[in-house]
Amino acid sequence: MTLRTKIILVISVLSALSIAALFLVQNIILSTRFARLERENTQRNIARAVGAVREDISSVSTTVGDWAPWDDTYDFVVSGSPEYVESNLSPGVLENLDVDVMAFFDQEGHLVHVALSPGSGTAGATIRDRLAELDGSPYLTPGTSVDDSLRGIIATDAGPLMFAAQPITTSLQDQPPNGMLLVGRRLDDVLIGEIASATQIELSGSPPSATDSDILSAGGSAVAVRDEETLLATLVLEDWGGAPAISLRAVLPRDVMHEGRRAVNLLGVALALVGLVSTAFLQTAVRLP
């Protein structure tokens, strides 16, 4: 083997090693960056799902805010007048309000009346029984302020109930509260489907599992690789007592990681071409007399 041949061989090997090392370093850097972007994108999607649930709770809050500070409601929680029920709580009213239940508690937190939407079906009786268990609860005893409102999720055997509760007072809010009005809507498969459609996230719900308490204590969400194409994000929502109420599972495409892999592949091709051209140039330069 001539000296010139050895030089060409050494140059070729060094070029190949340099290109390989550069590709490896860039691959690690890009993979790390795209993995971080994938996590950030996943967290944004989780936040969108949580935001959609909060928006639904806010809509329930709007309803309770319209009904609680009202002279007729203020009188009803004391008198239990059937005229109020006939005039204001007919079967179609709750359906038009898009809520499943309205529950009225007196000044001592005792349950006075429960109105159920016809659409609540067999779940309605279960919800009524769950609210009956709250009879006398200090949480549903109004304070001295009309601003002592509550909102959140109540776990029931019929599934989680998103709720908002507000002290009952007069229309002018010039009298101390004499009760609490609770308005709720079930977080059922229908509503989850509406949230999935609005957020464009493949979303499903299931009862809490044994591991959900750990997820809740760790921040309320967990993400795992489902397969090469998708991630599985688990979001655990807590009830007003701090226990898991429902697990929402989102199947998310790994678009960011796919873009990262394409970028790495293109980088590899580009570096290979640069290596070939550089090696050919150096070999030509060595061969020249």
Image (spheres, rainbow, N blue to C red):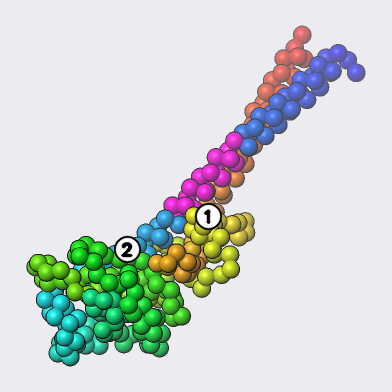
Crowdedness near tag 2: few (<14), some (14–19) or many (≥20) residues, C-alpha within 10 Å: few
Query: Where residue 119 sits: x, y (%)?
Result: 33, 85
Q: Which residue is mark 1?
A: 218
Instruction: Give the residue displayed 15% in from the left and 77% down from the top.
Output: 74
User: In the rendered view of the protein, which quadrant contains the C terminus?
Assistant: top right
One can see residue 35 in this view:
yes
What secondary structure is marked by label 1? loop
User: In the rendered view of the protein, which quadrant contains the N terminus?
Assistant: top right
Instruction: Give the residue displayed 27% in from the left and 72% down from the top.
Output: 141
User: Which residue occupies the foreground of this view, 202 or 184?
Assistant: 184
One can see residue 57 in this view:
no
The prevailing secondary structure element of the residues shown in magenta is helix
Q: Which residue is mark 2?
A: 55
Find out whether residue 87 is within the magenta segment. no
- Is 156 left, or right, of 142 in this rendering? right
Q: Is residue 226 above or below residue 39?
A: below
Q: Quadrant of residue 199?
A: bottom left
Query: Where residue 13 sits: x, y (%)?
Result: 78, 25
Q: Residue furthest top?
A: 289
| Highlighted magenta segment, given as a residue range | 29-45
The mark tally for this picture is: 2
Crowdedness near tag 1: few (<14), some (14–19) or many (≥20) residues, C-alpha within 10 Å: few
Q: Is residue 224 above or below residue 126?
A: above
Q: Amino acid at mark 2?
A: Glu
What secondary structure is marked by label 2? helix
Query: Mark 2 and mark 1: span between their CA atoms?
Result: 24 Å
Q: Amino acid at mark 1?
A: Ala
Q: Are marks 2 and 1 in contact (CB under 8 Å)?
A: no
Query: Where residue 220 sits: x, y (%)?
Result: 49, 58
User: Which residue occupies the foreground of this view, 220 or 201?
Assistant: 220
